[in-house]
Amino acid sequence: MNINKDLIEKYHRNACSTEERDAVEAWLFSNHTDEGLQLPLGESKAAHKADIWKGIEDFLPSEELSTAQEAKTVSIKIPATEKPRLNFWMGAVAATLVIGLSGLGMVQLQKNSAQNEPALVSVNNTSAIKVHHLEVSDYALSVGTNTSAKIDNLTGVVNLAGSILFSPKKDITLSFEGSPKKVTFKKDQTYIILKGKEGTEQIIVSEKNLMDLPPVLQKQIINEFKI
Amino acid sequence: MNSRSKRSLFFLLIALSGLFGCREKSLISGEEGQHKYSIYILGKDGKEYLLETNQLDSGRLTPDRDGAELNTREMDRSVMVKNGYYYYLNRKKTSLIKYAIKEHQLQEIQSMPLAQFSIENYQWLGGDTLLLTGLANPDFKQVRYTMIQTNAMKPIRAGNMEIPVPTGRFDNMSVGFVKRQGAQLLLGYTYHQQIGVSNYTTSDTTYITTLNYPEMTAVKTVKDTRSTYPGGVNTVQTSAFQDAQGDFYFMDCPGIALGNRPELSTAIMRINKNSTVADPHYFFNLSSAIGNHAYGMWSVGADKAIVRAERKDLFKGLGDHYSTPHFEFYLVDVKNNQVLQKLALPLDKGTRRECVLLKDNIAYISVNSSSEGNYIWKYDLKTAALTKGMQLAGNTDFILRIDKLR
């Protein structure tokens, strides 16, 4: 699907179809080249994204100021003629990041300027049917149905209620809120992480060991994530 | 040719013969298509391999060199192995696919559509007839079957089995065993209740329904509350067998890896020849005999079986149940309800594995040990001697299954 100004405007008005909304979000969270994005010749998607993030910084709380200031030292060249249009895009996307989305309770990304990686990834998937997929530079994440997942990329602390599939692109060490134990996730593997309500056990297994889980849980995961 | 170039040629020949020599010893040899056993490996880097070999007694195989690397998007270890072929239900393609290893690669031979089907149990009914019993996707409430002529990969018949769907607090179910008994089929199963994303519970009852065969209509159902969760998915691990007298033994597995009713006892139960109920006078309580829950049981002949039991003092929960070496193997006498011996093997890892084969009074047992490596051990049933057989080296993390290929 082509991501263009009209579609972004529609997204801002919360008037997108499910398919359109997914396309905009996939575009926003994706780091890969995107054939669907119509940009003038010679412009890079990375530059546009960086500028959008810059716009979002204005919405960030004051404690993020130092990070934001650092970010401003990263200069990105964008043709002057394009700037007014980009500013509109920034506002539109930034606003939708902090308001609730239908089917998807809330998605928040806060930028860490040093690595072009959001400092906080927060997804509240309130859908009972649909899994939400997103990708940042260090990992891909599939957030299961009725799941709230927060990953603080600076501290490596995860707050999870529900089920996620976590696929790191490099070795990543994380800890889970309420536990001092650190868990290392190996690059290019996919992990199934399940965490029920408070007091229940958290389960982390590689997707390769899915068959070691009880068949009742296996079937639920296979069905939910279509693996 | 001067002496220097002769020497060079000599060393080149030595090097080449070494190279080809290694290849000949490995599975990649002229015997492809004739091997007797297959071994399914999960590597340390997540890659998976199938190896074929003529013997398990000695030597060393390295999956990254001697095996066929698998496309893990297309396949996992829940394969059915027979007569040189591998059968696997590809969920995404909704196809049952027949494979063989040719030219060092797993190649698709034939396939047939099989949609909305989650395999719980497979049984070879004689010849090339395969009976798959499963649950209808995506609800896992309705028991279905499909009978297949595997030479041509054609369905013979398919449909629902007349088994009550889960009701009340129960929302899904598991089929544990399927046993052909003349013009009838016995089905062992139980019901579950999902409590949260990482938690569920199981009914305290083992259900056994007698079905008319091949109509799959119900004749009667009996309930047995001595333990719960008969068997397990037998494409992943065996936990039932019929002995030479025709008596059928199955395991009830309420431990956390299957039933999640750990307060109940893991037990071996028996359906006597021509009976349709579990023998009310027979109940081999493994939990009290071993002090732990067990999953997996393999007949080794003469009233004996090997069971694979967990060590609850060594793991914390489901999160480390598969990765911590804590499994032990016991030789049991099923006829006389006796644990004969705990086998002196290193602690094994992997919650569920197809890991025991019997040949000529030798039980071949694959063990994944963190300290001693991945070996197929040989247990001599006559002398009780236990020795190391073939080693799986290189990238091997888990030997996930060993099968008789032909």
Image: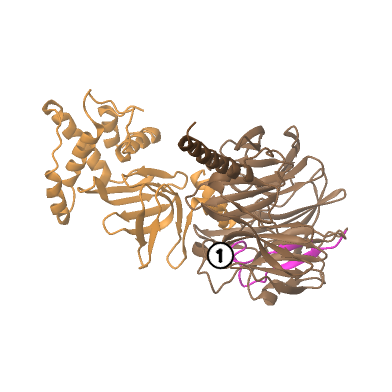
Chain colours: A orange, B brown
Image point 11% across, 28% down: which residue?
A80
The residue at the far front in this view is B2
In terms of image quadrants, where is residue B305?
Answer: bottom right
Compared across the picture, whether A88 is left or right of B75 comes to left
Q: Quadrant of residue B130?
A: top right
Residue B226 seen in the figure? no
| Residue wearing tag 1 | B372
Q: Is A144 above or below relative to B154?
A: below
Q: Position of residue B155 (x, y in %)?
A: 74, 35
Structural crowding at the residue carrying mark 1, measured as other residues with C-alpha within 10 Å and reported as few (<14), some (14–19) or many (≥20): few
> Which quadrant is the C terminus of chain B positioned in?
top right
Q: Which residue is at 80% across, 47% downward?
A: B217
Q: Position of residue A138 (x, y in %)?
A: 32, 47
In this view, the residue in front, B246 or B60, is B60
Residue B265 versus residue A182 in the image, above or below: below
Task: Spot the residue most to the top.
Answer: A41
Q: Is B31 included in the stretch rendered in magenta? A: no
Secondary structure mostly seen in magenta is loop
Which of the two residues, B24 or B315, is positioned nearer the viewer here? Answer: B24
Q: Circle 1 sits in a helix, a strand or a loop, which is it?
A: loop
A24 vs A86, left or right, is right
Residue B247 position within the rendered picture, expressed as x and y whole percent measured from the top left: 84, 61
Count up the numbered dots. 1
Q: Residue at x 18, y 47 (%)?
A: A59
* Residue type, mark 1 in image: Glu
Residue B19 left/right relative to A64 = right
Tell me if residue B259 is in the magenta stretch: yes
* Residue extent of the magenta highlight: B249-273
Q: Chain of mark 1?
A: B
- The location of residue B361, given as percent across then percent down, is 79, 61
Residue at 74% in and 59% down: B240
